[in-house]
Image (cartoon, rainbow, N blue to C red):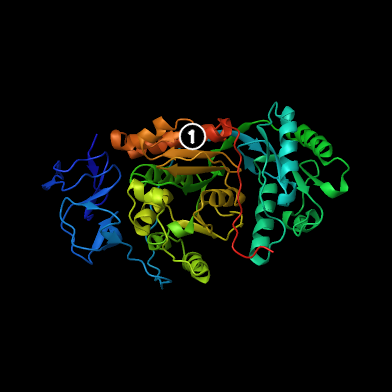
Amino acid sequence: MQNFFRIHPDDKVAVALKALTAGSIMNTGREEITLLEDIPQGHKFALTAIAEGEAVIKYGAPIGIAREDIAKGAWVHTHNMKTGLGDVLTYTYEPQPAPLFPERRKRYFQGYRRPDGRAAVRNEIWIIPTVGCVNNVATAIEKKAQIFRRGSIDAVAAFPHPYGCSQMGDDQENTRRILADLINHPNAGGVLVLGLGCENSNIDVLKSYIGETDERRVKFLVCQESEDEIADGIRLVEELAEYAGGFCREPIPCGELIIGMKCGGSDGLSGITANPTVGKFSDLLIAEGGTTILTEVPEMFGAETLLMNRCADKELFDKTVSLINDFKNYFTSHGQTIYENPSPGNKKGGISSLEDKSLGCTQKSGSAPVRGVLAYGERVSVPGLNLLSAPGNDLVASTALAASGAHIVLFTTGRGTPFASPVPTVKISSNTPLAEHKNNWIDFNCGTLVEGTALEELGEALFDYVTEVASGREVKAEEAGFHDMAIFKQGVTL
């Protein structure tokens, strides 16, 4: 196993692949460097002297500015470097040539074909409350309705949330759009929409957002109009299960898959192992005609120009500029610092600035051109790489990916997390110790990338694993029975 990794030839820092001790000699192939301090795994050390005010280079790009003179072999982290980012910026479109992907044999997964032609990777019954007031009713129905989880019914799951009333403006619109998107999601073979009756986002209001529905697939229940809402809910779930149980898995081209990409609890290895592997997967799926969606806009700050210049045309470039600057304005309009990132866990793992985090995070996008830019709650319509407006919060962003149409979410992490989302959420570790320690959370280990496995090999292995998940293999969160959702809240609660 290597001791350290230099990501780009122009880098002024290298990343420790394991804990390194002061006095150790690192052979870079150009020279030998004596470490002046202990370097924790995932953290950086200087490959050359860096003067105060000079850019610190990693990934071949600036990740910040030296606060003081940094000696060769010194630990480089938040104590001696800071972000170099500014506020709202002006950008110039400098398009990059699109890469040529080799032709691949057409691959298939075993999925469900819906009557409208869409593909699905799960055949579940979803219970979706319109308002938080009926959350306990939804979970009570879920518990009692587990008897209908049989045959081709993969799960019966409720999605409680605290919204749907006492909201104003964009918050209310966000709730209605996200709920409607989930109700229309192909992974749900049947949906019970559970309302209270007096809420702002009541069933009659929500129907205009949902659009036309098949009454066999979508049932509505207003609790205030029911003498026994739990008994009525169970009866409706039984009807939904009878309908959904008629679907069977069949071969579907992998090019019809829509995969969301997200990271959380990143460490210093995330941008070296897990995120590049997801990027390789993204390129492989897109080469087959598939679709990937990258989100968490605040973690594009500092790497946004790399995405902007991959936009397929000027219109998409302009949309991406708005995507970035609108989110910055959202921060400042609430009196918040744009670059209040990375998190304490990120810093402990070796990430020193938002640029450091963002340049690692955007590795998940691979090298394909940007073909679509989506507003929050907007459903994907164009194959290829799409960018989605959503915050960095794990549950909110993963729910947004599902609402935009993702069949599966790939979630890379250096710290680990047990959460789920409305769709299968694959936890991908950046390091082997995490995969071994939290085997009940982690589904796929990318730590082997620094242990000798080639990126191409690991990308193909991840493609194979995602195909298995799309064909019915449960991820760890599904095995635990976890189903989560969260909606983006931006404004006033009445």
Q: Quadrant of the C terminus?
A: bottom right
Q: Is residue 98 visible?
A: yes
In this picture, residue 62 sits left or right of residue 134 = left
Q: Quadrant of the N terminus?
A: top left
Mark 1: give few (<14), some (14-19) or many (20+) Cα within 10 Å. Answer: many
Residue type indicated by callout 1: Trp
Residue shown at 37%/69% (left/top)?
Answer: 86
In this picture, residue 342 sits left or right of residue 106 = left
Task: Estimate the x, y position of residue 138 in percent, counting from the top left.
Answer: 73, 42
Q: Quadrant of residue 26?
A: top left
Task: Estimate the x, y position of residue 109 in percent, counting from the top left.
Answer: 55, 34
Task: Estimate the x, y position of residue 111 in percent, counting from the top left.
Answer: 61, 35
| Callout 1 secondary element | loop
Please name whichever residue, 414 or 428, is drawn nearer the observer in this view of the structure. Answer: 414
In this picture, residue 143 sits left or right of residue 485 = right
According to the picture, the residue beneath numbered tag 1 turns out to be 441
Residue shown at 48%/40% (left/top)?
Answer: 417
Please name whichever residue, 270 or 34, is drawn nearer the observer in this view of the structure. Answer: 34
Task: Estimate the x, y position of residue 241 in percent, counting from the top left.
Answer: 75, 33
Is 287 rendered above or below residue 357?
above
Q: Is residue 115 visible?
A: no
**Which residue sits furthest bottom?**
90
